[in-house]
Image: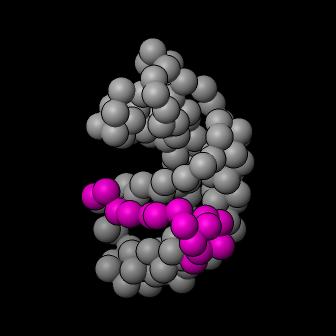
Amino acid sequence: DRHGHGSGDAVLVALAEACNGTFRASDPVGRIGGDEFAVLLDGADTEDGPAVIAKFQERIRTARVQGQDGPLHFSVSCGLASLGPETGGLQEWFCQADAALYEAKDAGRDTCRAHTGAGTYTRQK
């Protein structure tokens, strides 16, 4: 907000470019609201997800956006959750990912947390 709408648009373009360079064409990406997005890594296992997210975060770290007052740098925090028979359905899965995201945001910028069941989270690199 403090950098203006044009800068916000430029950040969204850089984010989309990072998505295109990281995720597969079959991985849907959608805006949940505000500055939150969701990505479905279909067929990814518990080791694939953190590796893909680490690649995405690195692309974001190195993205440069020209703001109205000079270059802007930005980062993303991520929450991961696996969908399986033990998850309890799509709503529960989404809630687990959202809770992991808030754990990551509480830990600081440019972080990732994975929901590992029973309300526990692990730090992802």
Asked whether residue 4 appears in the rendered view, the answer is yes
Determine whether 95 is above or below 32 in the image. Answer: above
Determine whether 9 is above or below 57 in the image. Answer: below
**Percent position of residue 55, x then y:** 70, 57
Q: Quadrant of the N terminus?
A: bottom left
Q: Kindly indicate the quadrant of the structure image that contains residue 112.
A: top right
Asked whether residue 61 appears in the rendered view, the answer is no
Which residue occupies the foreground of this view, 98 or 42? 42
Which residue occupies 39% across, 75% down? 8
Extreme residue in the top direction: 118
Q: Quadrant of the C terminus?
A: top right
**Percent position of residue 3, x then y:** 38, 73
Task: Determine whether, in the image, residue 31 is placed left or right of residue 22.
Answer: left
**Percent position of residue 43, x then y:** 60, 49
Determine whether 11 is above or below 82 in the image. Answer: below
Which residue occupies 52% across, 36% down? 82
In the rendered view, how is the structure colored? one colour
Which residue occupies the foreground of this view, 80 or 83? 83
Task: Determine whether, in the image, residue 73 is placed left or right of residue 105.
Answer: right
Chain part drawn in magenta: 17-33
Which residue occupies 49% across, 32% down? 84
